[in-house]
Image (cartoon, helix red, strand yellow):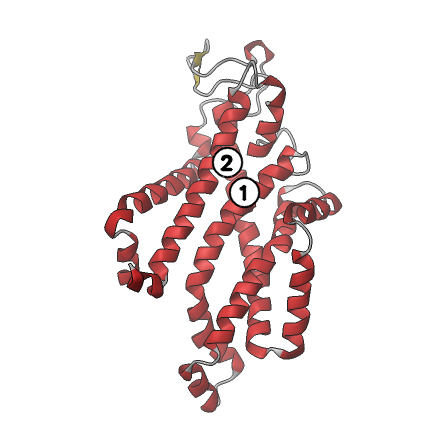
Amino acid sequence: MNEHLEYAGAGPRRGAFYLVAALVLCVALAAALTPWLALRDPFKIETRVRLKPPGTRFADGTVALLGTDAVGRDVLSRILWGARISLVIGLFAVIVAGAIGVLAGLLAGYYGGWAEHVLMRLADIQLGFPGIMLALAVTAVLGPSVPNLIISLGITRWVSYARLVRGVVLSLREREYVEAARALGAPDRRILRRHILPGITPVLVVLATVEVGRVIIVEASLSFLGLGIQAPQPSWGGMVADGRAYLSTAWWVSTFPGLAIGLTTTAVGLLGDGLRDALDPRLRRTQ
């Protein structure tokens, strides 16, 4: 494992990998330390300072580093609070989707038969619907809230895990050590826990990392459309939507939340790509 991690920082990709990892860590720390980093109340409405440009200093000595929105709320403070919501939804939705998908993939890949047929046909049916449309439908039924968003995004994202895990398990179950364990009378539960799960962990780590960024984008899209996080709770997608009417006069209201979405999801995706290079021994041999 240490050898693999050393590879992630070796060669010409060392600087890029560390930079991306540092950016993701900074976003996570900013979300965790938001109560101490936010200089102004993200919920306080002050119409007398509405649509102030970035760098505006107020009478109380605080500075709106990224300006204020249409009702005078500090854009930077709302971006920081929105980061907490986006990361929480992204992480827990990935956990829900991963739990469902890994279980389905293990059953389909290891046992095959009717379990594989039923689960993979369900996956094919779900793939027939655009992911964002399915998330919209589930969220509309459950209602817009953080727990419901996590559930709806988890339900709509499990297929990627199931198909990936099934493919890896189909290969692993024919390996000599698995056949030996089965010949010695080891129960299926032990084989899955001791021999199959460790083999699929690297690909799961990579997929989960990439999926966090995708879930953040879907959550922002739902909030932009009004079916995600509801006001007055800050949400990056909701902030972009709030600033649409002021793009020509107060560009910062939408631009900075949009940059937060783009930078975070890009950094998470690049981190997943770096982890894929680090954890895949076949790629190590070809470099």
Q: Could you tell whether 14 is left or right of 224 in the image?
A: left
In percent of the image, x 42 and y 29: which residue is there? 37
Mark 1 or mark 2: whose residue is earlier in sequence: 1
Q: Residue 149: horizontal and vertical position, in percent?
A: 63, 45
- State whether residue 170 is above or below residue 92: below
- Looking at this view, is 267 or 40 the one in front? 267
- Looking at this view, is 98 or 179 the one in front? 179
Circle 2: residue type: Ile
Q: Could you tell whether 60 is left or right of 232 in the image?
A: left
Q: Residue 14: horizontal and vertical position, in percent?
A: 27, 47
- State whether residue 235 is above or below residue 199: above
Asked whether residue 97 appears in the rendered view, the answer is yes
Circle 1: residue type: Ile
Labels 1 & 2 near each other (Cβ < 8 A)? yes
Q: Label 1 belongs to which residue?
A: 216
In percent of the image, x 39 and y 57: which residue is there? 276
Q: Could you tell whether 63 is left or right of 100 in the image?
A: left
Residue at the farthest left position: 11
Q: Label 2 belongs to which residue?
A: 261
Q: Is mark 2 on a helix, strand or loop?
A: helix
Viewport quadrant of the C terminus: bottom left
Q: Residue 183: horizontal and vertical position, in percent?
A: 46, 90
Q: How far apart are marks 1 and 2 (CA)?
A: 8 Å
Q: What element carries label 1?
A: helix
Residue 236 falls in which quadrant of the image? Answer: top right
